[in-house]
Image (tube, rainbow, N blue to C red):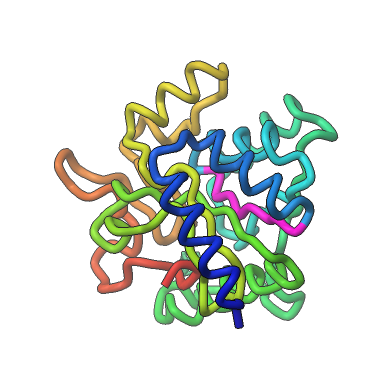
């Protein structure tokens, strides 16, 4: 349970950081939480990994390897590994050894996400005090009201969303300004990229995440709600 003092501190910080740059938010998190900080990065783009590696050097960058990532996603991971070397504190978290590649995603996406994403996230967060994510308000209606930071009751950590206010132009501008590689699928109609069985390109005018679990009511993998 968070103390009343912590909740007050977070409310103050959230008000101050609402209009701060992502770099300022990550720097605040690094200063406040040090190596108690973990960032989960999906590598649908390179921006969050770069922001964390450059501004929160003690933070771990966790990538949840579901066994179903696109080859293009691994290409981006490797590009960033090459570029940042030891400064890139990447931890690849895999599902429990008993979980093998299977067809569960065909009939039970909730169960599949539970063992391939939610359980590894639990391990990534264990013992940490704060968690950086890459969610953005423009991702879709379920994220439209996401705050820049908050106490996350479910996971028992401070949840920090440094790029929450970014639109697509902000993101593209950051990649350009820092000479970061783009995910190869981003220019092929994939504005949101997860596992290949559950991601399709979207049509003009569709929500960014319309291609995730398309044709079902599922909109989130269980990490954020
Ligand atoms: S997104 Fe699809 S393939 Fe990936 S863990 Fe969830 S159900 Fe399984």
Q: Quadrant of residue 89?
A: top right
The foreground one among 31 and 104 is 31
Quadrant where the C terminus sits is bottom left
Q: Would residue 81 be found to the left or right of residue 181 on screen?
A: right
Q: Is residue 165 visible?
A: yes
Expressed as whole percent of the image width and height from the top left, the position of residue 204 reads 16, 38
Q: Would residue 199 be found to the left or right of residue 92 on screen?
A: left
Q: Is residue 107 found inside the magenta-colored segment of the image?
A: no
Expressed as whole percent of the image width and height from the top left, the position of residue 49 reads 62, 39
Residue at (48% x, 63% y) in the render: 150
Against 68, residue 77 (above or below) is above
Q: Is residue 76 visible?
A: no
Residue at (25% x, 45% y) in the render: 202
Q: Would residue 218 be found to the left or right of residue 51 on screen?
A: left
Expressed as whole percent of the image width and height from the top left, the position of residue 48 reads 56, 40
Residue at (76% x, 53% y) in the render: 91
Stretch in magenta: 36-43
């Amino acid at each position: 349970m968070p103390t009343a003092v912590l909740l007050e501190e977070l409310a103050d910080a959230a008000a101050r950081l609402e209009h701060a740059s992502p770099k300022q938010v990550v720097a605040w998190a690094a200063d406040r939480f040090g190596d108690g900080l973990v960032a989960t990065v999906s590598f649908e783009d390179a921006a969050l990994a770069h922001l964390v590696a450059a501004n929160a050097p003690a933070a771990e960058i966790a990538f949840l390897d579901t066994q179903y990532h696109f080859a293009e996603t691994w290409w981006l991971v490797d590009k960033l590994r090459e570029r940042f070397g030891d400064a890139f504190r990447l931890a690849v978290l895999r599902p429990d050894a008993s979980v093998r590649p299977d067809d569960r995603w065909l009939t039970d996406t909730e169960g599949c996400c539970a063992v391939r994403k939610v359980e590894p996230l639990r391990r990534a967060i264990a013992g940490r005090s704060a968690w950086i994510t890459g969610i953005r308000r423009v991702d879709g209606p379920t994220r439209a009201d996401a705050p820049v930071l908050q106490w996350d009751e479910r996971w028992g950590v401070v949840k920090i969303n440094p790029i929450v206010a970014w639109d697509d132009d902000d993101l593209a501008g950051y990649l350009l300004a820092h000479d970061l590689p783009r995910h190869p699928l981003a220019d092929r109609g994939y504005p949101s990229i997860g596992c290949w069985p559950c991601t399709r390109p979207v049509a003009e005018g569709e929500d960014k995440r319309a291609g995730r679990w398309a044709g079902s009511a599922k909109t989130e993998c269980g990490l954020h709600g």
